[in-house]
Amino acid sequence: MARMITFRTIITVLALLSLITCPTLSEETENTCPNPEDDCANTDSKVVTPDDNATVKEPEDPSCPSRPHIVRCAAAHLDVDKNGRLERSELEAAIDALPWLSRGVLKIIGSVDKIMAKCDADRDGAISIDYDMDATTETCLASCFKKRAFKGAFFPDCEL
């Protein structure tokens, strides 16, 4: 049975390719907000209300999801055993679940190795949600484009 290549599949492949092959894509261009008053690089997605000090979650900017949002979504959707670490096998399983074209292109260019190299700060073979994600802010999902591509590929509907 022949599979039809959709526009979304092509966009996903292109986004993932640049996520892996372009470690420093013009960060000043990528992090430019459509609205100059917004702060795309703002990683704090919670606001404390003055009335009752309750924490209220603000909606994520779809053009530039915050890094904490991506980390929460990765923990919820990719960390299968819920141990707070994204092991190589879990990352490989997530890639295997992608459309066939995206998966094939990523496997050819060695994406798991590149993602692990950029995001596993302590080189223990797993990306810890706490330590590694805090230690790799400059190399792992550092731009709006990369965060958008990662979310779009692995958990497009995540609203955590």
Image: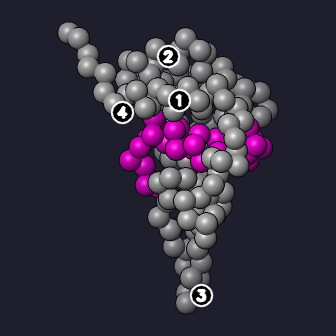
Q: Which label sits in the foreground, 3 or 4?
A: 4
Mark 2, other Cα within 10 Å: few <14 / some 14–19 / many ≥20: some
The residue that disc 4 covers is 8
Of marks 3 and 4, which one's residue comes earlier in the chain? 4
The residue that disc 1 covers is 16
- Asked which quadrant contains residue 22, the reply is top right
> What's under tag 4, amino acid-wise?
Arg
Residue 92 visible in the current orientation: yes
> What's under tag 1, amino acid-wise?
Leu
- Asked which quadrant contains residue 100, the reply is top left
- Residue at 53% in and 14% down: 107
Disc 1 and disc 2: Cα gap in Å?
9 Å
Identify the disc placed on residue 105. Answer: 2
Disc 2 and disc 3: Cα gap in Å?
49 Å
> What's under tag 3, amino acid-wise?
Pro
Disc 3 and disc 1: Cα gap in Å?
41 Å
Relative to 17, is 136 on the left or the right? Answer: right
Provide the secondary structure element on which disc 3 rests: loop
Of marks 2 and 3, which one's residue comes earlier in the chain? 3
Query: Do the residues under discs 3 and 1 have CB atoms within 8 angstroms?
Result: no
Of marks 4 and 1, which one's residue comes earlier in the chain? 4
Query: Do the residues under discs 2 and 3 have CB atoms within 8 angstroms?
Result: no
Position of residue 124 measured from the top left corner of the image (x, y, whole percent):
74, 27
Provide the secondary structure element on which disc 2 rests: helix
Residue 131 visible in the current orientation: no
- Residue at 54% in and 53% down: 65
Of marks 2 and 4, which one's residue comes earlier in the chain? 4
Position of residue 16 measured from the top left corner of the image (x, y, whole percent):
53, 29
Q: Which residues are magenta?
A: 131-160
